[in-house]
Amino acid sequence: MYFKRFVLSFFCLTFVLLLAGVTRAQTDSNTVTISISSGMAPTFSWVPDIPIGRLVVEQGEKELWGTETEGTDTYRSPIRYGVHPPDALEDVPADPLVAGETYTVSLFRWIRFAEPESLEFVGSQEFSPIPAAEGEEEPVAGIRPTLRAGVLAPDFKLEGTSDTQSWWEGAESISNLVTIEPEEGGTPAGRTVVRVLANAQEIVVGVRCYDSEPKGIVAFSKARDVAFEDEYQEDHIVIVFDTFLDGRSGYVFSVNPNGARSEGLVIEQGEDVNGDWDTIWDAKTSRDNAGWSAEIRIPIKSLSFKKGLTEWGFNVQRRVERLQETSRWASAKRDYEIYQTSRAGILTDLPEFDLGVGLSIRPAVVGRGRKPEPGASTETEGDFSLDITQKLGSNLLSALTVNTDFAETEVDVRQINLSRFPVFFPEKRSFFLEGADIFEFGIGLDEDTILPFFTRRIGLYGDPEADQAPIPINVGGKINGRVGNSNLGALVANTRKVEEFAATEDTTIEVGQATMGAFRLKQNVLEESSLGMLATFGDQQGRADSWSAGVDFTFRTSEFMNEKTLLIGVWGLLNNREDLEGDKSAYGLRIDYPNDLFDVNFTTIRIGPGFDPSLGFVPRRNIHLWDFTGDYKPRPNWSLVRQMTHEFSFRLFNTWNNSEWESYDLLITPLDWLFESGDNIKASLLRQGDRPPEVFELANDVDIATGSYEWTRYAVEARSAQKRMLSAAIRWEAGNYYNGDLNTLEGALTLKPSSFLTLEFSGERNTGKATAFDEEEETFTETDFTEELFGLRFQLNFSPNLQFSSLTQYDTQSRELGSNNKLRWTFNPLGDLFLVYNHNMVRRVSDNRWEFVSNELPVKIQYAWRF
């Protein structure tokens, strides 16, 4: 009896509770009122403020963003679009909202005691986002934001103010950026407002950089083509365009408050930028009591892009040097680089661009006077060169160069080489830099391992690398660009026959006419990955049957383990030439985790004894490399220290079949502190070993015999922030070296008294002793040696379009003093005048007196006609 009453009571109570729950849900859904703020990242509020477990924003059946707890109702009003509350289960980024479109926001809460766990509907509300008034909405780091381009008037004048009526009539703006440094996700000390205008022929970016202390703006340079690794030492802005919207490529433009500007190409899947690329564009800046402004004008003919796109990837970054502050528009996270276009925002409402005929003709006239050697009479000559480019649609560019002249190319910066491996000098010739990003192969390949295609193997000849001299190029052709999801690059060049080429100081050889080239095809796959092939042919020395070919695959994601970056790359190459023997292959694997707190990578590369591509750079053959590097970079939140880096790196070179080791480097860096001021100190320990297979020259008249050597070295260095008028860097390294010891002292001093003048002094002194081997006497002698290198660089900046630069260098290995002096006047965005003077002297061994070697005075004027 009691049991029946209990069962009946239980069912009645259960029915009442269920009815109450349904009634509660109906009551909540009917009584909850949801409010949505203005802005493209609106805030959702609801009353009454009941706790919920999920909020989702949808357009039709497509979910644009949602945030959810792990089974508990802990969310309270309000929640902002794209910003996950602390209890969120996942930190998934939001898709950008479009002004005027209709969306629905819905609220849910968890049903207690349900098996399995489920959600019940609380309420919903339709809304159409409306852009907030300028300055009223802070950007959200998790959202890929959008910016609508305004219409550029045909009579627009570049003035550098970005506050004229042209900018305010219908131009949407970025009202502020988000800080990366010193705080991730913070509000900058000064606002940055960005607008974009475009018409069929041009795109113009206007930037207003507010600064409460305009006298503290750090800007010394007015130079063109400031190196990208150096430009961050002044206030500046960086603009990035992803004109193919592929998240892998892009164009980079940078301007400082003085109007100094540089451009580059996104390379290495967005991990770096090639600052040697050059194109036609213009910029002007101005300053006032509220900060500084910049206007950047880029002709559409200077870019390649995917036809039919009305949206491009777009990002903006600003640096305030005195505060060591960096802020960004899209993806303002330390784990991402500004060059990672897959994390850029979206520039919308672009017009249909008009390339015209797409033809550019740039003739150049060169006059040259030279004295090639002591006692020779002065020679004079005139010459003509021609560069023609033709757009093959909007995304392919073909180029033809005839009788190519590189008179304006800066000389190589000298290096002291105390190893048995060749030194590396980067490409600086403009013809080979255009579209250079397309010819990249694999990931993590560099001058220390292998470069499958190295354009300095064309039109330059000599051994060692430091003694290379130019060989005239008769004609060259190139095609580069993108077709759909395919990246295409092809290059071919024919060099002139030289009957008496100075191979050494005492001998000349005949270098025959040669035709060389390369072909690269890379297919975009998955979200951010690529699959490609590379082939080269020809040989500057005329050696027969010379070719190389290879394939590479790179997997890349920026969403690994909660929006971290991960890269995995594999590649393989084959080559051939009449003089090569043995295994002619090379292959490798790299796993890279390049993020702010942990930066870890592992690389293995195997290079056969017969792998030596004629158009590649391979410093070592017959090796198998094993390389691991791990950096731990915490930010201690101390008042003086911004970031600490602790590095462990081990690089082992075995023979190609791993039978024995050839050399190794173990690097431990327990101290590497970056201060809030921008100054840096560092201390390292280096353990090394080497087994040279043959005698090599360590320094002048110091030969190291074959054998097995192991040693330990120590290094300390300090570097002051270059935001100051006077900055310096010094590095001291000491310890054993092979069978002796070596002390190295390097220093640099930079003086920037004004934006007109920059002076830089640099020096390196190596002193040591070694047990040298005398091959003739077959004896060992303890020998002291000293090798030094000195450099003086100064620049006069009359304006961003008129500069004089000079680089003077002397080193004791060659005993040569060389001076390269260049005046560049950009009299029109399409035209340049170059006046160059090179002077070389040598210090005689017998009496240390200076002796003339050669000099040269080229004058070059070029102008481009675009149709």
Image (cartoon, rainbow, N blue to C red):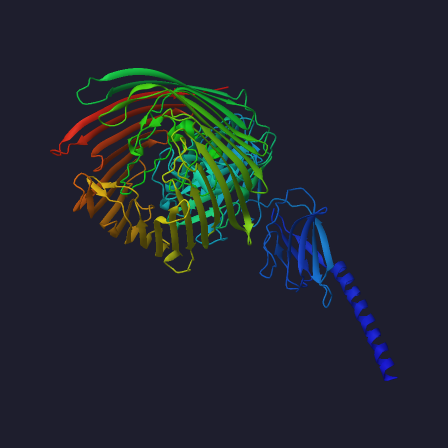
Q: Can residue 455 be seen?
A: yes
Q: Can residue 293 be seen?
A: no
* Front one among 832 and 607: 607
Quadrant for residue 226, please give it.
top left
Q: Residue at x 27, y 26 (%)?
A: 503
Asked if residue 852 lies left or right of residue 625, the reply is left
**Farthest residue toward the left?**
847
Asked if residue 178 lies left or right of residue 64, the reply is left
Q: Is residue 583 above or below residue 76?
A: above
Asked if residue 329 lies left or right of residue 634, the reply is right
Q: Is residue 807 above or below residue 471?
A: below
Give residue 617's position: percent from left, percent from top: 39, 35
Give residue 131's position: percent from left, percent from top: 61, 44
Q: Residue at x 41, y 33 (%)?
A: 613
Give residue 372's position: percent from left, percent from top: 23, 22
> Which quadrant of the figure contains the N terminus?
bottom right
* Front one among 247 and 145: 247
Give residue 7's position: percent from left, percent from top: 84, 78
Asked if residue 772 lies left or right of residue 117, the reply is left
